[in-house]
Amino acid sequence: MGLKRTKLYDMHVKYGGKLIDFGGWELPVQYEGILKEHHMVRQKAGLFDVSHMGEIEIKGQKAEDFIQFMVTNDVKVIKDHQVQYNIMCYPDGGVVDDLIVYRYSPDYYLLVVNASNTDKDFDWIKQNALNAFADLSIENVSDQYSQLALQGPMAQEILQKICNIDLNDLKYFWFEPSVSVAGVDCIVSRTGYTGEDGFEIYMKEQAPLVWEAILKAGGEDVAPIGLGARDTLRFEAKLPLYGQEIDKDINPLEAGLGYFVKLNKEDFIGKDALLAHKEAGDGRVTVQFEMVGKGIPRSHYHVEKNGVNIGWVTTGAFAPTLNKNIGLALIDSKFNENEGEFDIIIRDKKIPARIRQGIFYKRNK
């Protein structure tokens, strides 16, 4: 069976994208090089095809109550046209997926989920709606949407040239449900996965037209960006990746995402397990570290202290903007000490690293 392609496949070929198999999708890992693309987004603007992401619509009178039961964050605090980062857990506290919730109204939500988890998430949501929420309309509408992300300090200036709303009025983590972008009706949200200001743009048709219009509007200040730089950008900004920082065996409290877990709200799936974990006050914790010795820490490399395995690297890389090798590691919480040192096992060698706070990228706002 062949790889799936987004509606922008011809654009990736036209602009010289190096195409790879990414979870069953044929997508560009890079165009002109990961480092060059990374710096382009940090300094000017970059355009990403993220049409492989999944979209699930939930409609009905009990939509708000249902989503509140399914996720860890408090969806009842957000207003119409607001966006919220969220986590969906299993009863044992492990993570089904992390996702973005778009609220149109109390009766209508759009969930944007990770591409590789779309079918699993949809099944999980349907399964949990069977009894008390059987009247809801729950639909996987992923095939209906293309999604572009325009990210970087010049993103607003570029997009403003071809859209019909004042982007100054669109605040961070809000969306407009009907915006004309290059004459195409789109959903535009001020969101992203790079650590920069920017927008995510959803459309049901004419995705190549919008892609080309954005590149034309930006000229030399924007470039197409591949999945390679998308990963280095998100990691450098300490944004979690499903399958690394969180998964079915790593709960959001262990991952350092407790801010998005509202244990004081009404019942939700995984609440009891997460409460018990918090009250126990031990176990595992995610720490940020920088390399002291030479070497790049990679995902799943072992972490040792005095020759004893205390955990593993969830993500590690050379951070281009920071110009150093940094990482996140899930370790035994007994060893979580700021400025504390441990060893990363790289090619059977012990390379020293140091736990440090505040080492990841934060843009100047």
Image (tube, grey):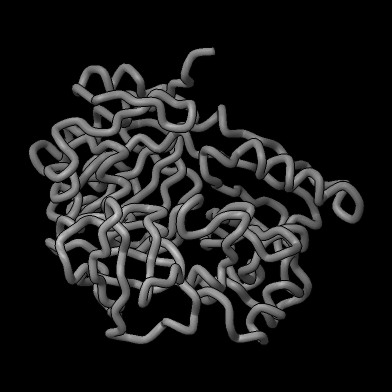
The residue sitting at 36% across, 65% down in the picture is: 328
Looking at the picture, tell me which residue is in the foreground, 16 or 349: 349
Quarter holding residue 163: top left
Give the vertical position of 117 relative to 216 (above or below): below
> Do we see residue 197 in this rendering?
no
Looking at the picture, tell me which residue is in the foreground, 132 or 19: 19
> Do we see residue 119 in this rendering?
yes
The percent position of residue 102, horizontal first and vertical second, equals 56, 54
Looking at the picture, tell me which residue is in the foreground, 347 or 186: 347
The percent position of residue 16, horizontal first and vertical second, equals 19, 22
Give the vertical position of 188 relative to 168 (above or below): above
The residue sitting at 25% across, 27% down in the picture is: 212
With 59 as the anchor, is 317 left or right in this view?
A: left
Q: Which residue in the rendered view is the most extreme toward the top?
A: 1
The residue sitting at 23% across, 33% down in the picture is: 30
The residue sitting at 78% across, 72% down in the picture is: 267
Quadrant into which the C terminus falls: bottom left
The percent position of residue 137, horizontal first and vertical second, equals 77, 42
Quadrant into which the N terminus falls: top right
